[in-house]
Image: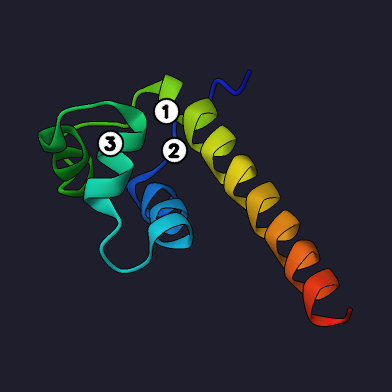
Amino acid sequence: MPTRRLTAEELEMAGRALYGERWKSPLVRALGVPSTRIREVMRGERLCPVGWTQDVLIILHDKAVACVTTVQELEERINK
């Protein structure tokens, strides 16, 4: 399990990769945290909790797997 905290920049990088330009609210829901927490991290008022690192990596991994699976399924359908 990772023990390093994500930086605000890394959190934003992951959030944008997952949810696009309007990433904060969906990431709040995915992490199950108050919306103020992410805003505080982004303003430099708080550090990301260590636990967010693993949670964000899992969410990214799951989305990547879902995307690859969808691409494969669509390619199979299109190429029939």
The residue under label 1 is 52
Under mark 3, the amino acid is Arg
Q: Residues within 10 Å of mark 1 (few under 14, many from 20)?
A: some
Q: Estimate the x, y position of residue 24 in percent, counting from the top left.
A: 25, 51
Which residue is depicted at the point 65% across and 50% down? 66
Which mark is in front, 1 or 2? Answer: 1
The residue under label 2 is 6
* In the displayed structure image, the side of residue 50 where residue 1 appears, left or right: right
Residue 41 got which mark?
Answer: none
Q: Estimate the x, y position of residue 59 in percent, counting from the top left.
A: 52, 38
Residues at marks 3 and 2, CA–CA distance in whole angstroms: 18 Å
The residue under label 3 is 29
Q: Residues within 10 Å of mark 3 (few under 14, many from 20)?
A: few
Which mark is in front, 3 or 1? Answer: 3
Under mark 2, the amino acid is Leu
Q: Earlier in the sequence, mark 1 or mark 2?
A: 2
